[in-house]
């Protein structure tokens, strides 16, 4: 018998699966369906927020554990960490969710826009069902981001690590598409949706009692023009941010630098924003909060859904090209292990770092390009972004 605990914004009640119709991909909330027999007890942030998070088949309540739980032999063990991973329905996010969940030390909240796709992906990847939940998040809507944060808080779970991983890449688009808020899609999803999410969830991270709290924003080599890959046209460049300041909407420019639309450039620009945002977080909050802020280039994962909109010829040639010619290729599983390291490896706690891996898969602190490490631009990007997402 599968029971489901669902946090619906309006009702906050517990439903049986049959009543709720979890197969609806427009699902909103958190589902632990199919996890009913699990022993997982979600770490609660405080005893005030005592919504039951997991229901075992015969019980209805969950105690709020502290940082440590007593194991069977009476020893104190660190509770499971809670990590939110955006875009965990495929590619890097899915592989990282699997790598983390399989350790048994993490409960992964897969924050995704398509519940059904995510549930299928999690199942076929064999992610242990007691170690993940799915929560709806559409980064192409600022309302959805706010709703996600509210739902997460209502769940009562602590937030120990947030991974901003989701992205969209539109290399063949001739004209821009827009988010629900009328912002160009690539920058709207990859940067602004995550910017709002990270800004709001900083409060949750601050409250966590976990020993190593982290906020990770996935970057890329293609936004760094101090590399060959970063010099393949169209090159990234934010200019003076005039397009962003004007709102990236259909009335003005859809590009951050104010230029005309180029889908591949918009993606690369959004990656610069991701890397600048991570550093600005570090400058503003690391000392005060002790949170580790980091970014990474996980390697060229040439087989993921990121290239779904590229022409078929590209999709066919890109993986062998990266494997045999550039040697920059990395499998989804390997990239997932890399991201999982940045989430949980005790040796990767340094803040403000852009991690990369060498050919032996050893991590190292990489250098960002001049533009991706421009502190003045990062500050300006922060301020303009705050206005666009309604925080200033
Ligand atoms: C552009 O197109 C869009 O036009 C633009 O709008 C924007 O969307 C942009 O970044 C996004 O993409 C992309 C692409 C289209 O154009 C290019 O990349 C131009 C360069 C293509 C020329 C390829 C030069 C290849 C250089 C390698 C030379 C190899 C020498 C061989 C030596 C071998 C020794 C072992 O083009 C495509 O979509 C198709 C090109 C895809 C890129 C990959 C290039 C593949 C090269 C061949 C790979 C074969 C792999 C086999 C490996 C076997 C090894 C044993
Ligand atoms: P995938 O396309 O496989 O994964 C992207 C994820 O983002 C999917 O889960 C997708 O959801 C999700 N997503 C897209 N739009 C939204 C949205 N509006 N709201 C919520 N989620 C959304 O690509 P990758 O795994 O390759 O990309 C993951 C990260 O890795 C990205 O940040 C990318 O920039 C970065 N990266 C990738 C590299 C590569 O070579 N592939 C190299 C360097 C960095 P859905 O399944 O519903 O579409
Ligand atoms: Mg690139 C060492 C060389 C190297 C690396 C590591 C990458 C990574 N690429 C390299 C070289 C080249 N690429 C060369 C020489 C070419 C010309 C043939 C080339 C082309 C190319 C294209 C057309 N590469 C691409 C594209 C894309 O559409 C991808 C992209 O820019 O997505 C935004 C891409 C990528 N190359 C990479 C990586 C990691 C990507 C994609 C992913 C990303 O940044 O998220």
Image (cartoon, helix red, strand yellow):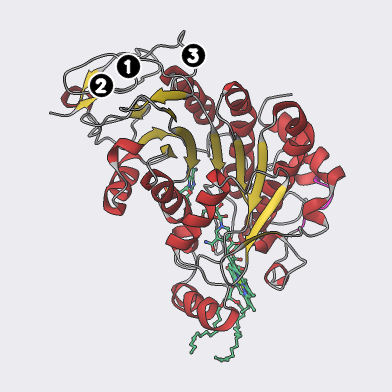
Q: Of circles 1 and 2, which is in front?
A: 1
Q: Which residue is mark 2?
A: 55
Residue 77, relative to residue 230: is it above or below?
A: above
Q: Is residue 342 above or below residue 332?
A: above
Magenta segment's dominant SS is loop
- Quarter where residue 129 is shown: top left
Residue occupying image coordinates x 46% and y 33%:
82
Q: Is 240 displayed left or right of 98 in the figure?
A: right
Q: Residue at x 65, y 49 (%)?
A: 295
The image quadrant that residue 269 belongs to is bottom right
The answer to whether residue 238 of the structure is visible from this angle is no
Question: Residue 334, position in %: x, y?
Answer: 47, 62
Q: Which mark is residue 291?
A: none
Badge 1 density bin: few <14, some 14–19, many ≥20, Cα 10 Å = some
Residue at x-position 78% and y-position 32%? 284
Q: Tell me if label 1 and label 2 are in contact, CB under 8 Å.
A: yes
**Mark 2 to mark 3 CA distance (whole Å):** 18 Å
Judging by the rendered image, the residue that carries numbered circle 1 is 62
Q: Horizontally, is 173 left or right of 316 in the view? A: right
Q: Nearer the viewer, residue 209 or 164?
A: 209
Q: Are marks 2 and 3 in contact (CB under 8 Å)?
A: no
Q: Position of residue 235 (x, y in %)?
A: 73, 65
Q: Quadrant holding ligand 1?
A: bottom right
Q: Within the magenta stretch, is there residue 148?
A: no
State which region is magenta: 237-241
Can you say whether 11 is above or below 194 in the image? above
In three-dimensional space, the C-alpha distance between marks 1 and 3, rounded to whole angstroms, equals 12 Å
- Mark identifier at residue 46: 3
């Amino acid at each position: 018998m599968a029971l489901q605990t669902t946090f619906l914004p309006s009702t906050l009640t517990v439903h049986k699966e049959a009543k709720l119709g979890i197969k609806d991909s427009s699902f909103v909330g958190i589902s632990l369906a199919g996890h009913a027999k699990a022993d997982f007890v979600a770490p609660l942030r405080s005893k005030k927020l005592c919504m039951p998070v997991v229901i075992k088949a015969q019980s209805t309540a969950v105690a709020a554990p502290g940082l440590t739980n007593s194991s069977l032999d009476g020893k104190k063990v660190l509770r499971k960490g809670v990590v939110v991973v955006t875009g965990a329905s495929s590619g890097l996010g899915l592989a990282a969710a699997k790598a983390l969940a399989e350790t048994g030390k993490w409960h992964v909240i897969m924050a995704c826009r398509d519940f059904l796709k995510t549930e299928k992906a999690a199942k076929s990847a064999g992610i242990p069902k007691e170690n993940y939940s799915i929560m709806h998040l559409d980064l192409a809507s600022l309302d959805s981001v706010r709703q996600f944060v509210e739902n997460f808080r209502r769940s009562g779970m602590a937030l120990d690590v947030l991974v901003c991983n989701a992205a969209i890449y539109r290399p063949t688009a001739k004209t821009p598409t827009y988010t629900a808020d009328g912002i160009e899609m690539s920058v709207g999803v990859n940067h602004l949706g995550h910017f709002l999410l990270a800004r709001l969830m900083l409060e949750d991270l601050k409250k966590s009692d976990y020993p190593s709290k982290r906020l990770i924003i996935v970057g890329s080599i293609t936004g760094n023009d101090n590399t060959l890959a970063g010099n393949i046209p169209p090159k990234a460049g934010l200019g003076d941010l005039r397009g962003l300041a004007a709102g990236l909407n259909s009335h003005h420019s859809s590009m951050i630098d104010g230029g005309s639309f180029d889908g591949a450039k918009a993606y690369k620009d959004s990656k610069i924003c991701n890397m600048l945002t991570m550093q600005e977080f570090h400058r503003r909050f690391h000392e005060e909060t002790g949170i580790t802020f980091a970014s990474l280039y996980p390697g060229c994962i040439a087989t993921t859904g990121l290239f779904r909109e590229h022409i078929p010829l590209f999709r066919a040639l890109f993986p062998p090209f990266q494997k045999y010619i550039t040697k920059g290729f990395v499998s989804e599983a390997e990239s997932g292990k890399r991201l999982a390291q940045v989430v949980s490896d005790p040796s990767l706690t340094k803040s403000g770092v852009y991690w990369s891996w060498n050919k032996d898969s050893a991590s190292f602190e990489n250098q960002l390009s001049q533009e991706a490490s421009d502190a003045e631009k990062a500050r300006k990007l922060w301020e303009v972004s705050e206005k666009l997402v309604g925080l200033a």
